Amino acid sequence: MQAASRESYTAARAALEESARAAGAAATAVTADEVLAFAALLDREPRLRRALSDPSRPGDQRGELVRSLLSGKVGQASLDLLVVLASGRWSAASELLDAAERLGADALLASADQAGDLAEVEDELFRFGQIVAGDPALAGAIGDFTVPASRRIELVHGLLAGKAKPSTVRLAELAVGGFGGRSFANALTRLVEMAAERREAQVAYVTVAKPLTDAEESRLASSLSGIYGRTISIKVTVDPTVLGGLCVKVGSDLYDGTVAKRLAAVRNALVGK
């Protein structure tokens, strides 16, 4: 997002946090669904999207347009929040759409946080991503953009409903729809990181040949926390092809100490002689 859009999103996010503190988990989940429904409306209606991001129209007029469209159709908390969103300054119509979708995800995470489920939702999203990545047929079905999103969402709902937290299910469905214009895998990764950010943590993606023990994972998290100066949320992928050692990715930093990497380096050195 450009600067004006970031400021407008930040203002709407602050309004969401204030509303969520007063409303509680269940009501905030309802707000999330209504905000995401508004995002879907913006996606379907480019003329509305342009009207609500038109810099020549004062913010209060754009806010009143939203109020007139949605009064009686969404709850008061959602209506007030969407008025704040529409009243902001947007550098492009697409950035308003992205902000509305992200605000809906923020509301889902706020609801999970209030329910005490945020860390579990974060882990469930990551594990679901691993399950899908490990099954080529499932990954193909979920990521096939030639199939209507509604059908792929039904597939994900059937896989997760009753087996994961409601917020996990809803966020996974959002990923299927291409959250922020991303692929399913990238959307899920971004949502995992947003959940961690809400807990004031940073995600470390760790690849190992065999599962880490709880003690090993705890030591690694503590070591990385010392390096980065913040809480680290460890996400482990087991891949026997790395043979041993571990690969750690935190943000743009990558440390690959796997046996497979060292063997590849040796092979390359021998070939170069």
Image (cartoon, rainbow, N blue to C red):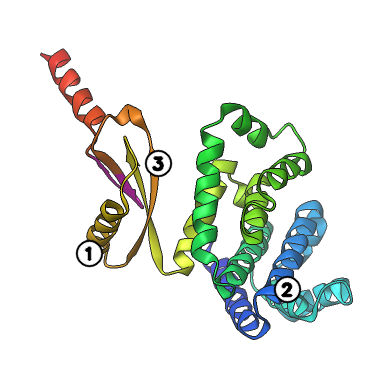
- Mark 1 or mark 3, earlier in chain: 1
Which numbered circle lies on residue 237? 3
Using the rendered image of the protein, determine whether residue 90 is visible from the camera's viewpoint.
no
Q: Nearer the viewer, mark 1 or mark 3?
A: 3
Question: Quadrant where the N terminus lies?
Answer: bottom right
Q: What range is drawn magenta here?
A: 248-256
In percent of width and height, residue 124 lies at 54, 53
Query: From the image, which quarter does the C terminus lie in?
Result: top left
Determine whether 17 is above or below 148 in the image.
below
Name which quarter of the figure residue 121 lies in: bottom right
Q: Please tell me which of labels 2 and 1 falls first in the chain.
A: 2
| Residue depicted at x 62% and y 49% | 175
Nearer to us in this view, 266 or 47:
266
Indicate the quadrant where residue 38 lies. Answer: bottom right
Q: Nearer the viewer, mark 3 or mark 2?
A: 3
Q: Which residue is mark 2?
A: 82
What kind of residue is marked 2? Answer: Leu
Q: Are marks 2 and 1 in contact (CB under 8 Å)?
A: no
Q: Is residue 106 left or right of residue 147?
A: left
The majority secondary structure of the magenta stretch comes to: strand
Residue 207's x, y, as percent?
A: 34, 40
Reply yes or no: does residue 3 show up in magenta. no
The magenta stretch spans residue 254:
yes
Residue pictured at 22% horizontal, 61% vertical: 227
- Give the amino acid type for the residue marked by disc 1 in the picture: Gly
Residue to which mark 1 is pinned = 226
